[in-house]
Image: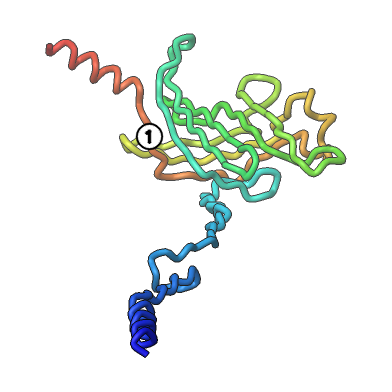
Amino acid sequence: MKTLTHILFLIILLSCGEKTPKEKPALSDTNDSTTFNTSIKYKEKKPKKKTALHETLLCKVNGKDWGYTSASGIVSTQRKTGKRKAVVTFKRKLEKGSESIQLYYDADTKVLDNISCSIKVPKTNKDRGVSVFGGAVLGKEVANKDDINGKIDLSDTKYLSGTGHIRNIPIFALEKKNLANPADSIITITNLKFANISYSDLDKAKALLKSFNKKK
């Protein structure tokens, strides 16, 4: 009887000494620091928006409106002739490529006497345009006094303004075979008018630099 009592006492001690195992935290528990996030999000790149180019109407080229996106002017004395020229350049930025019109005025008489241009027109059997180059100079066979005329105002020391009317400007002969419309072989520019175009007078700048060097 005493032995049985001792055995029961030992069983009770052993059962009290066993530790209940702790439950391991589940990986899916979002409040635990051991949670793993296997989903990775990537930001989609948004396509760049095309910036609309602002155009200022300058003239009509073969009856169609033509505007420029940038313009500048330079007044200087030509080395060969000794004449002062005012050159005004207008550029038109396109989605692909660009166009330009360049006007040459006599800075003393203020009269337009030369022009060059690069205009895109449709090609033969193709969607893309081709740049055609033309030029006209007074006193030569390509132009006469009735075909080219215009005036420039240089009274302002910072900004210039002017007008122009040019017709029958032939393009280079090598480009004529690529034209979809044979009429594009002759360029006519009408209603040309501009104002507030900033310019630099290189002769005045040189004179100022020369006087500054003398004072040193």
Colour setup of the view: rainbow
Q: Is residue 60 above or below residue 168?
A: below
Quadrant, the N terminus: bottom left
Q: Is residue 16 left or right of residue 82?
A: left
Q: Is residue 45 above or below residue 10?
A: above
Residue occupying the far bottom of the picture: 1
User: Could you tell me residue 9's position as x and y percent?
Assistant: 33, 84
User: Which residue lies at the image location 70% right of the left edge and 33% below the top edge?
Assistant: 131
Q: Quadrant of residue 10?
A: bottom left
User: Could you tell me residue 112's position as x and y percent?
Assistant: 53, 31
Q: Is residue 208 left or right of residue 12?
A: left
Q: Is residue 46 above or below residue 18?
A: above
Q: Is residue 82 above or below residue 131?
A: above
Q: Nearer the viewer, residue 72 or 170?
A: 72
Residue assigned mark 1: 154
Element type at mark 1: loop
Residue occupying the far right of the picture: 125
User: Which residue lies at the image location 43% right of the left edge and 32% below the top edge?
Assistant: 73
User: Which residue lies at the image location 51% right of the left edge and 33% below the top edge?
Assistant: 89
Q: Is residue 52 left or right of residue 156?
A: right
Quadrant, the C terminus: top left
Q: Dot 1, crowdedness within 10 Å: few (<14), some or many (≥20)?
A: some
Kind of residue sitting beneath label 1: Leu
Q: Quadrant of residue 200?
A: top left
Residue occupying the far left of the picture: 216
User: Could you tell me residue 121's position as x and y percent?
Assistant: 74, 40
Count of marks placed on residues: 1
Q: Quadrant of residue 34?
A: bottom left
Q: Nearer the viewer, residue 130 or 115?
A: 130
User: Could you tell me residue 26's position as x and y percent?
Assistant: 48, 71
User: Which residue lies at the image location 37% right of the left edge and 74% below the top edge?
Assistant: 19
